[in-house]
Structures are given as structure tokens and as C-alpha cells.
Image (cartoon, grey):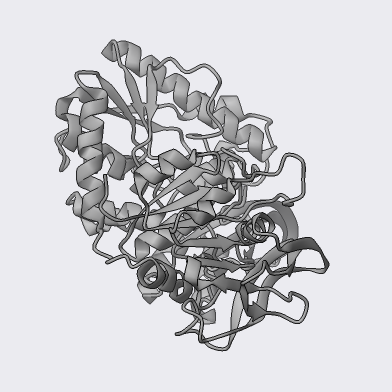
């Protein structure tokens, strides 16, 4: 049991675990639980503070998620966010109504800087709004501490009872001073010391895994990416030779990546692991033949992964657990819990219904990418591997729009290798969360060497993000994009046009499919 913790109660929004991540950025331990958690269990946890999350519902809906009013009377500070703010108002006798004008996106909010939440915040500050309902009238005894021209109660508080509420989302990067607000609540209002560190997570997770697995055999799905690599090393620390890592080369990896993974984790690599490489390129290409729909591709790739693992497990004999490097953005985008499905990840929503293992273990399931990297460093994994570019489980299958073929894989591998090489040569990779080349299904007319061409367009993507739940398109230097474009159209057969994606997340996702 942690000495200090903040409890996040989940009411079904997209950013719920992101709130927990922001709290952990304040070096305070945090857990996310469902809003149905009984009050008695909450008392036993003894949190220093509680945060009500956002959600897609109206507080007046018949099936809307609601918690007990008693939670607001425990003497524990509570912060309500978006739906959570409306719920607080509703439970305490305020008025919530359909807003005459919905607010969505970056909005200037005027705040009372005398409030404990806003003491270090600009009086006019940019916040991320996403609501149709709004608090029409605050409950009795509450002071209004924030407003917009169309939202009369953008923030409210009753500090003598430790109750605070904001209509906007302080947890997303689009709220410019959101971390100041959350830090003020966690460290100021709740009085947390901020002494929790990632090494605490690593130590406790190793002990938890050791106890859970016991003498069982473990099969780890190793892709060579950051997430699965950290999961593999974490398991090796916990159970040693009980672990076998299976690396499936599905033919959808980046250029030369299969050999690179084997060099790191194979018999001559740096880790004392049981390592098996399965070359299954033709098997995956055959399954994907003629398939264009993104979700169908994801589910096909996911099922084939599992079938390959099952086959390898039978060769090893009596494997009890399958370990995967699932992280929280995979979970939330796959629509688990009450969130909307954005896309199925092969190691989450893309799993087939029947999997021949006793249990699937996902030790990183509640972490975001930057937290996974911190855990990797705590485990002694080299920085080169820890800070490797993120790569989706379905690989280039979701960076090729439309049908996947061996020739299209070759095109996107070559273009992506050029792009990554020039980004690194220019030294502009340090501030980027992710960057890659994707192959569109658009073909257009071009002219090369006085000859007419009718070839594909490559789309380049680069984003800045800390959590991979939200992202901004990176403004790369034009000379870098120009050099990349010139090299791709000259060196990659089948491409005559290069595009740059300027879209953020939201409304787009980071990957193309």
C-alpha cells in the first residue's frame, strides 16, 4: 500500500488514465478505479485526494454513471473534471443544462487567480473544452472561479470542504497551464509530498509478477520495440529462465529491423533470454491478400500473432502465461471499459476470442510511453533501445493504406529509412515523439526523365507529444523535407510524390490506420 495516493474515479472519458499520468508526473502515486467502487473500499484506500474524470454522458441520463454524494462528504479533497464537474454540481443541488453553444477545442478561460487552483496561472488562460452540457448554476456555497463568454461556470470551488471543479480538461497538453492546476490540487490542496518515483513501480511490479507467475512458464511477445522490450526485461528480472521470448518477423517491420532485433535479444545479444525468431512473412502476406479495411487488417494481424505464439508455445510445452507490451494508449483507443473504439490494437482489442493460454499478462498496461521509457532506464536497458522510435504492433500493415503487398512493403520500408536517416542527420529528431513514412493508396501522374509516370504518393508524419494521447504536428525545417522528398522520389521505385501531414491528434490519430 502506498503511503500517499490520489484516486481517479473513471466515468468513461477518453483521457481518464492521462489524468493519472499527470498526477504521477507530480511524483505522487495514482490509481484509476471505476466510479462504482464502494465508498467503504475508498475509505480503506485512504487517498489524499479524489479526481472525478470526464465522460460522454449527461448527468440527467437514465443510465448515466453516478457515484454516491457521500464521497463529497468524507473530508477528502475532490476535483471534478468536465462530466465530473457537472456531476459534483448535480449531486450538491446545482443546475446542469444543455449549453446554448457547445464548446470544443482551445478556449480562453478567465480564472480567479486567488483560487488555490489558479494562483500561479494567468488570469486569461487557454484551456481545452469538450462539452455539450454545462453548469448553469453552481451549488449553494460554491464560488465561481472561472468562466468563458458562453460558459458561466467554467470553474467553481468550495475550499472549506476541499471541493473543486473545472469544466475543461487540465490533463491534456492543449490546456496550456493544466499541469500547474493539477499540481496545485495534488501538492497544494491535497498536501502530497511528491516523493513517489518510477523505481517504486519497477520494484513492486517485479515482486507482483514473481508472485503471480510462481513456477509457471511464460511466453513473451517480443517485437523489439520499446514496450515489448521493457516488458521482456521486466519479466526476465522477475522469473529468469522461465521466460521464453518469441520474435515474430511478420514481414511488416521497418527496413533491416528483424536482424537488428535478433542482434540485441538473440543468443549473441545483451540479455540472458530464451529467444526464438519466427520468419512468417509469407504467412502474413497471404492472410492480408485483398484486405483493405484497417480494422480487418489489425484483427487479422492480431490473430496470426496469437496463432504463431500458440504454435511456438506447444513446441516449448505447457506455457501458462502470455506476456505482451500493451500500454495505456493501446487500451483506451481499443475502447476497453466505457471509452469509444478508435482502433483495435493487435495486443488488446484485436485479440481473437479464444486464446490458448492460462492468462495474458500486461505489466505495462497502465503506463504511457514516456513512463515506459523511465521504467526501461530503471531496469538498466540502454538509452538507444529505450528511446527507439515507437512502432505499432501491426507494423507497416497500418502504414500502408489499402491492401498490403510485398512490393508496397518494400516501398514504404525504403522511404521510411530515408526519412529517418535524414531526420537524424539534421539533428531534429530530439524533440519529436514519433516520425515515419506511410504509403497512401493514391496514385497520381508525374514526369520523371521526360517520361510520364503514374505512381504512389508517400506521406511523411512527424509529431510532438509526451503521452501519445494528444499530439501536435511538428514544424520540420523545409530544407530537411526538401532533401527527404528529393531522395525518396529519386531512390524509391514506384513513388513520384511526397506529402507532409500537418494534422494533430485529435482530430487525427498518430498512425494512418
> What's the residue at 46%, 30% (across, down)?
281
Residue 389 in view (yes/no): no
Residue 510, horizontal then vertical, whole percent: 56, 57
Would residue 228 be found to the left or right of residue 235 on screen? Answer: right
* Residue that protrudes farthest toward the right in the picture: 100
Residue 259, horizontal then vertical, whole percent: 31, 41
Nearest to the observer: residue 247 or residue 441: 247
Nearest to the observer: residue 377 or residue 486: 377
Residue 98, compared with residue 223, is above or below; it is below
Residue 429, compared with residue 11, is above or below; it is below
Would residue 32 be found to the left or right of residue 109 on screen? Answer: left
Residue 416, compared with residue 107, is above or below; it is above
The quarter of the image holding the N terminus is top left
> What's the residue at 43%, 69% (across, down)?
185
* Residue that protrudes farthest toward the bottom in the picture: 123
The image quadrant of residue 278 is top left
How many marks do you count on the picture?
0
Residue 194 in view (yes/no): yes
> What's the residue at 22%, 27% (across, down)?
211
Residue 126, horizontal then vertical, whole percent: 60, 80
> What's the residue at 26%, 55% (across, down)?
198
The image quadrant of residue 262 is top left
Residue 66, compared with residue 357, is above or below; it is below
Residue 17, horizontal then vertical, whole percent: 48, 52
Nearest to the observer: residue 54 or residue 75: 75
Amino acid at each position: 500500500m502506498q503511503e500517499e495516493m490520489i484516486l481517479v474515479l473513471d466515468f468513461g472519458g477518453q483521457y481518464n488514465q492521462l489524468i493519472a499520468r499527470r498526477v504521477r508526473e507530480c511524483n505522487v502515486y495514482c490509481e484509476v478505479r471505476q466510479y462504482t467502487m464502494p465508498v467503504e473500499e475508498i475509505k480503506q484506500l485512504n487517498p489524499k485526494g479524489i479526481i472525478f474524470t470526464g465522460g460522454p454522458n449527461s448527468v440527467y441520463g437514465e443510465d448515466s454513471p453516478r457515484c454516491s454524494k457521500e464521497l463529497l462528504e468524507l473530508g477528502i479533497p475532490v476535483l471534478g473534471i468536465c462530466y465530473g464537474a457537472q456531476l459534483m454540481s448535480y449531486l450538491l443541488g446545482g443546475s446542469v443544462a444543455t449549453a446554448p453553444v457547445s464548446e470544443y477545442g482551445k478556449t480562453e478561460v478567465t480564472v480567479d487567480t486567488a483560487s488555490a487552483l489558479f494562483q500561479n496561472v494567468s488570469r486569461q488562460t487557454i484551456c481545452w473544452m469538450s462539452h455539450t452540457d454545462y453548469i448553469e448554476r453552481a451549488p449553494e456555497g460554491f464560488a465561481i472561479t472561472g468562466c468563458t463568454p458562453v460558459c458561466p461556470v467554467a470553474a467553481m470551488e468550495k475550499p472549506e470542504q476541499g471541493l473543486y471543479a473545472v469544466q475543461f480538461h487540465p490533463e491534456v497538453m492543449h490546456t496550456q497551464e493544466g499541469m500547474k492546476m493539477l499540481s496545485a490540487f495534488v501538492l497544494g490542496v491535497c498536501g502530497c509530498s511528491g516523493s513517489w518515483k518510477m523505481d517504486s513501480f519497477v520494484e513492486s511490479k517485479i515482486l507482483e509478477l514473481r508472485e503471480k507467475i510462481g513456477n509457471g512458464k511464460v511466453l513473451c511477445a517480443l517485437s523489439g520495440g520499446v514496450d515489448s522490450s521493457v516488458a521482456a526485461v521486466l519479466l526476465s528480472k522477475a522469473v529468469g529462465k522461465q521466460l521464453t521470448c518469441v520474435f515474430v518477423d511478420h514481414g511488416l517491420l521497418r527496413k533491416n529491423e528483424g536482424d537488428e532485433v535478433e542482434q540485441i535479444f538473440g543468443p549473441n545479444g545483451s540479455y540472458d533470454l530464451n529467444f526464438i525468431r519466427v520468419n512468417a512473412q509469407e504467412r502474413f502476406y497471404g492472410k492480408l491478400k485483398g484486405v483493405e479495411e484497417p480494422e480487418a487488417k489489425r484483427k487479422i494481424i492480431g490473430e496470426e500473432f496469437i496463432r504463431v505464439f500458440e504454435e511456438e508455445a506447444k513446441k516449448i510445452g505447457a506455457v501458462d502465461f502470455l506476456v505482451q507490451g500493451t500500454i495505456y494508449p493501446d487500451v483506451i483507443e481499443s475502447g476497453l471499459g466505457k471509452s469509444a473504439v478508435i482502433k483495435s490494437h493487435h495486443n488488446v482489442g484485436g485479440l481473437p476470442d479464444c486464446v490458448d493460454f492460462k492468462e495474458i499478462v500486461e505489466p505495462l498496461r497502465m503506463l504511457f510511453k514516456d513512463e515506459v521509457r523511465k521504467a526501461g532506464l530503471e531496469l538498466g536497458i540502454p538509452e538507444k533501445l529505450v528511446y527507439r522510435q515507437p512502432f505499432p504492433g501491426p507494423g507497416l500493415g497500418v502504414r500502408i493504406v489499402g491492401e498490403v503487398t510485398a512490393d508496397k512493403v518494400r516501398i514504404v520500408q525504403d522511404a521510411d529509412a530515408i526519412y529517418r536517416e535524414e531526420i537524424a542527420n539534421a539533428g531534429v529528431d530530439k524533440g519529436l515523439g514519433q516520425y515515419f513514412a506511410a504509403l497512401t493508396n493514391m496514385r497520381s501522374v508525374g514526369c520523371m526523365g521526360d517520361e510520364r509516370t503514374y505512381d504512389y504518393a508517400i506521406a511523411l508524419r512527424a509529431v510532438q507529444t509526451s503521452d501519445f494521447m494528444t499530439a501536435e504536428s511538428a514544424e520540420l525545417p523545409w530544407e530537411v523535407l526538401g532533401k527527404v522528398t528529393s531522395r525518396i522520389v529519386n531512390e524509391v521505385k514506384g513513388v513520384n510524390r511526397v506529402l507532409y501531414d500537418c494534422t494533430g491528434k485529435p482530430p487525427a490519430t498518430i498512425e494512418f490506420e
